[in-house]
Amino acid sequence: MRQDHLAHALLFHGPEGSAALPLALALATYVNCERPGDADSCGQCPACQKAAKLVHPDVNFVFPLGGSSKNDDVADTKVDHLKAWRTFVFDNPYSNLHDWAVAAGFEKGLNISKGVAKQIIQTLSLKSFEGGYKTMVIWCPELMHPASANALLKILEEPPEKTLFLMVSHHPDHLLTTILSRTQKILVRAFTDEEIIPELLRRELCAETTAHQIATLADGSLREAFLLAEDAKDEHTSTVRDWLRVCYSKDINAICSIVENLAALSKENQKTLLLTAINVLRECLLDKSQLTRMMRTPESEREFIQKLATNVLTSEKINQIYEKMGDAHYHIERNANSKVLFMELTFAVARILR
Ligand SMILES: [Zn+2]
């Protein structure tokens, strides 16, 4: 990544869920870094820190907008959109256009409007704030209004000095050929399973066995992998919910049938399930202690936790069940007979609950 050989317009293109946007952002950071290494920015200097927060004054962003249900006041919404964009990129830079529409609350078709080219040209005609490169990151340039795209051709051909266009597209085939021919194309490949698995584990999204399964299904997309991990987590929470209901019901047939199901899970999944149950108990305790702002459960699961905490569980009961779950986790780790273990555990929890 030597600056002196850098083309002034680059197109990062790759499949959805690839690192196309993160790579463009990394380059925008690198060219402004005050102490760059051979291959990467320092990550420490003020320029890097501003770039990491997406607030570097010389790194500009253009992204599609759409009609929203709110009443738009132009100046206000522009600021709001930039704020929404930053949050969106922080949360998951591997997201796609649909995710952006949902995150920003757009209801109508997204596009980069006619007037954008004028803004871009104006911005780039000003001197850079910090003396380095003036960078224009354009996400989904294929959604640019043709009038805007055509108005950009000249500046793409003969850009002001130290200007850098970084376009990021998942569908470069939808770009005007006149734009395409003026950019240097950088193909960003899909992720490999070996890259996806550690990323899921680093973010503590799932257990290792699940991470392997998810990586196979995600087909190189980190976006897809995150969604699958989210689903797997929801599934565990709903199993815990069913299990606690059965414990409370004292229905022997239901108890036997859920124990069969739990015993049939893989050891990894059994451990994850117990940790999920422990987490549910922790959340109940927080709810009881009115520490709701420390709770991590999504809104959709709150009702179940609140009911459990209010109607069924005392703090003492929570502690007792907590201990049983912790013991069970310890014994699964040491290869206990899972059918016996879950049967005993379920009866113990049922006794505590009633
Ligand atoms: Zn730096």
Image (cartoon, helix red, strand yellow):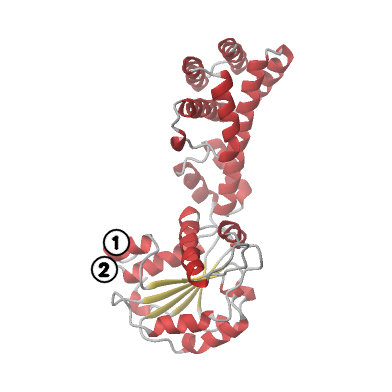
In the picture, the quarter occupied by the C terminus is top right
Tell me if the residue at label 1 has its CB under 8 Å from ligand 1: yes
Task: Name which quarter of the figure residue 48 lies in.
Answer: bottom left
In the image, 163 versus 1, the foreground residue is: 163
Viewport quadrant of the N terminus: bottom left
What mark, if any, has residue 316 been given in the picture? none
The quarter of the displayed image where residue 172 is located:
bottom right
On the image, numbered disc 2 is attached to which residue?
A: 34
Real-space CA distance between mark 1 and mark 2, rounded to the nearest whole angstrom:
8 Å
Residue in the picture at 43% in, 65% down: 25
Question: How busy is the neighbourhood of tag 1: few (under 14 within 10 Å), some, or many (20 plus)?
Answer: some
x then y, percent, for residue 288: 48, 25
Quarter of the image where ligand 1 sits: bottom left
Residue 31 drawn at (x, y percent): 34, 71
Whether pointer 1 and pointer 2 mark residues with C-beta atoms closer than 8 Å, the reply is: yes
Q: Is residue 346 above or below residue 96?
A: above
Q: Which residue was labeled with disc 1? A: 42
Secondary element under disc 1, as helix, strand or loop, is loop
On screen, residue 109 above or below 177: above
Tell me if 253 is positioned left or right of 50 in this view.
right
Element on which disc 2 rests: loop
Is the shortest distance between ligand 1 and the CB of mark 2 under 8 Å?
yes
Residue type, numbered disc 2: Glu
Picture coordinates of residue 118, whole percent (x, y)? 50, 84
What residue is rendered at 52% in x and 85% in y? 152
| Extreme-right residue of the structure | 253
Count neighbours of disc 2 (C-alpha within 10 A) and say few if under 14, some if 14 to 19, many if 20 or more.
Answer: some
Residue 40 in view, yes or no: no
